[in-house]
Amino acid sequence: MMTSQEKLEAILSRYEGAPADLISVLHDIQEEFNYLPQEELKIVAGRLGVPLTQVYSVATFYKGFSLEPRGIHHVQVCQGTTCHLHGATRLQEGVARRLGIEPDHTTPDGQFSLEKVKCVGKCGVAPVLAVDQDYFGEVGVDTLAKIIKTYRKPK
Amino acid sequence: MAKIEFPLVTRHLGAIDPESVEAYTAVGGYASLKRALMEMTPEAVLEAVEKSGLRGRGGGGFPTGRKWRFCREAPGEMKYIICNGSEGDPGAFLDRAVMEGDPHAIVEGMAIGAYAIGARQGFIYVGHEYPLAATRLRRAIAQAKNQGFLGEKILGRPFSFNIQVRRGAGAYVCGEETSLIAFIQGNIGEPRTRPPYPPQKGLWDQPTVINNVETWANIPVIIDKGGDWFAAIGTKTSKGTKVFSLAGRVKNPGLVEVPMGTPLRQIIFDLGGGLKKDREFKALITSGPGGGVLPKQFLDVPVDFESFQEAGGNLGSGSMVVMDEACCMVDVARYFLNFSFEESCGKCTPCREGTKHLREILTEITKGNGKEEHFTLMEELCATMAGASLCGLGQSAVNPLLSTLKYFREEYEAHIREKKCPALVCRPLLKYTVDPDTCTGCLVCLRECQVGAITGDVEEPQEIDQDLCVKCGMCYAVCKFDAVKVES
């Protein structure tokens, strides 16, 4: 088991350590840690020679980064135009209700986080819902429970 | 799926294994790069692209050859090229399809471009939502390097070129070229004033060419078949083909690639199979949040840069979302303004404040709180934003609103004057009831209702308490017997 510091070192070793590497480094941290932990960001700032305020600015400007831990499963509800025309709002509300959280939040047990995304480019099967890397098309409010259940860890 | 009519850019999609360089070379891949490097001078490559008449497929329609020449002739120690694979417009998925399905075509196109321009380093920006595209492009680059199509002294010639993939982090504004440059430099994606344009002063202040995925994917074809061959396809001012991602209320959604100048009707009805449930065509949303909405009188318009612009649409990203009579135009305008509001970077006031206020006004209208003076107010705000915003996001964010106001003013009037949504979309203006004759009392709606507005016994007709109802439409969506009725 690698410590978080070793994990971070492994990430930083892939880059030259230039300020322009910042976004790529943040991507890798997010992938490894599931969010951007504050301590790691401080180290990154020092090593890339970027002020911490700048790191914070970048980390909060882009929607793909999260300063809060995300759930084990990340649920994305597509809000693209075609999905919108096919009831994406209703779908998103249905998911929120079943998970008991609003978008951009994580369930208290850490299992699920929910995000509204712009368009996943699968407009042919709108409305679309993604759990991690799995995509579900033509999702109705009535089929939601079944999808979520397959990812929920038994108590 | 929709039919591809004239496959150039999409010629390899689904036909070859996108993860294999051998599969790409087996169908003639990298032959154009070989020809360019072995038989042509950079100037000859540039001339071929100029002669082809290829214009940028990312939105602006700027002649690609001219952009390349500006960059080639601009003074600068280093020159860069960038492939813009942001494709942020909701409803567009053609760039994703090419990045995932034919990544080597992009790599080859960029290598040819780098040779013509004199660039040694390239970047591919891939939108945050497209992880698979980034993986496949990275693999393609590694394979191309192995085969000697990228790297030092490519094919033994005194030409070196490398490409890095940069995955987006979720900001629509990064599709704008100066924001994209800021992103690659590791900053927040805020645009800057132009000029200087990127071919003069781009990445790290060096001359930089930015073309989108579809543009780069056209390059190997042009070198293979020649500029004249390419220029013979299409219309007088728009050459070659255009790929569209056809979606919305259309029977066969998917990618279509047609010669420029093909009438809209042919795309929607012949290739797309017409509308779902054979409903009436109402309008076409072109090019997402920065595009306009075209009503049915434009169905016979040929798709090319000029005709589209004249009609009030935008060829732009190539997304086409078809709407039928069940789509509300006020809701669509509100949807797009909300999108632009959320994606505005906040740097310039007209865009930041304009999108905010337009979104608020439109939301009020969809709630039935619209006023007559909103018409003038919206038009004034639109004029300011279009004229004074720093980049394309703010300048074009007004297009969905202006075009719907122009062609569907009566729908706005219905919302404002009669407090009705004719398409039965805007929630606050709707009323849900249960038809007691059709209702079986299965209680599915009762269980789904989050506010407890539905009451009734098993196998008895249900009733909706109008004071409690929040009009979310869940009952309507889950009823298997069409017993829930909606009216405005």
Image (tube, coloured by chain):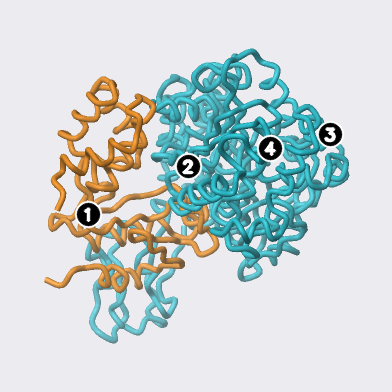
Residue hosting label 2: B334
SS for dot 2:
helix
Quarter assignment of residue B392? top right
**Label 3 neighbour load within 10 Å: few <14, some 14-19, many 20+:** some
- A56 and B342: which one is in front? A56
Question: Can you tell which chain is drawn cyan?
Answer: B
Give the CA separation, mark 4 to mark 3.
16 Å
Is there a contact, CB below 8 Å, between mark 3 and mark 2? Answer: no
Residue hosting label 3: B51
The kind of residue tagged 4 is Ile
Residue at point 45% right, 25% down?
B182
Give the CA separation, mark 1 to mark 4.
44 Å
Given the image, what chain letter belongs to the residue carrying mark 2?
B
Q: Nearer the viewer, mark 3 or mark 1?
A: 3
The kind of residue tagged 3 is Lys
Give the CA separation, mark 3 to mark 2.
43 Å
